[in-house]
Image (cartoon, helix red, strand yellow):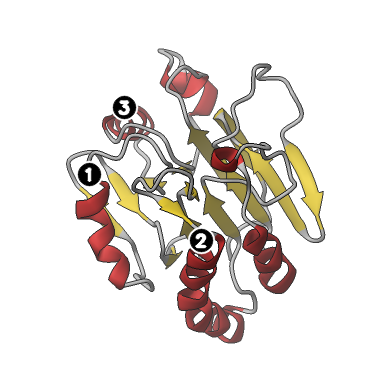
Amino acid sequence: MRLLCVADTTRSLAFSPNIKSIYGNTDIILSAGDMPLESFDYMATMLSRDVYYVYGNHNLKNFSRDMKKESFPHSPTGDMNSKFYGYLMDGKCIRLKDSGLIMVGLGGSMLYNGGDSQYSEREMEWRIRRLVPRLLYNKRRYGRYLDILVTHAPPYGMGDGEDLCHMGFKCFLSFMDRFQPRYLIHGHVHLDDYNAPRVTEYNKTKVVNVFGSYLIDDEMLGG
């Protein structure tokens, strides 16, 4: 599968006039947060592909309205924001019927000023616990818990910042230890050099900072 991943900025190749020639064979589009929802329309239209997204800690105009749906954490297909061609997966576990790809979304940053889409370590742990029954079902039914964890903040100690806003979550490390996703993709940590290393190995998981835009091409995904 080919996954176009975006986060944090529209100043990337995913929003260039050449998007079709660069990313034309993309299967799905994933947003790891801090993207204006209106930007999804361009990518979805140009590539004729669906966008699945989580919220970051910015661009939160529709956050309160959309996150009311988080009370249904095991949506099989996601909830489509039809105006902007995006499926909100924040706080949900989703399995795509066509490809079999299993994804979990856990957006937001560390709690630093009491704003929307900010969570304490304990609050993020609670969000994870709500998903455990579905993950256990996936393991029994499909032989694995999930394929991709989409977050906004990074895991603690893995390319995160020293300030509270940009500090990563320790519970993401525990998540990877237990559920072993093939990928954890995140944004939030901006890269001055787009060619800087983006991928870190953690046990069986590749942790990828997808700031701007990044293409994952992995034929082993899904099934």
Dot 2, how many residues are within 10 Å of its Cα: few (below 14), some (14-19), or many (20+)?
many
Q: Distance between the Cα atoms at labels 2 and 3?
A: 23 Å
Residue behind mark 2: 103
Q: Is mark 1 on a helix, strand or loop?
A: loop
In which image quadrant can residue 193 be found? top right
Whichever of labels 2 and 3 marks the residue nearer the N terminus, that label is 3
Q: Nearer the viewer, residue 209 or 213?
A: 209
The residue at the far top in this view is 17
Whichever of labels 1 and 2 marks the residue nearer the N terminus, that label is 1
Q: What residue type is labelled 3?
A: Tyr
Residue behind mark 3: 42
Query: Residue 110: image x %, image y %?
Result: 52, 49
Whether residue 186 is visible here, answered yes or no, is: yes
Q: Which amino acid does label 1 sit on?
A: Asn
Give me the disc on residue 62: 1
Dot 1, how many residues are within 10 Å of its Cα: few (below 14), some (14-19), or many (20+)?
few
Query: Residue 108: image x %, image y %?
Result: 45, 49
Q: Which amino acid does label 2 sit on?
A: Met
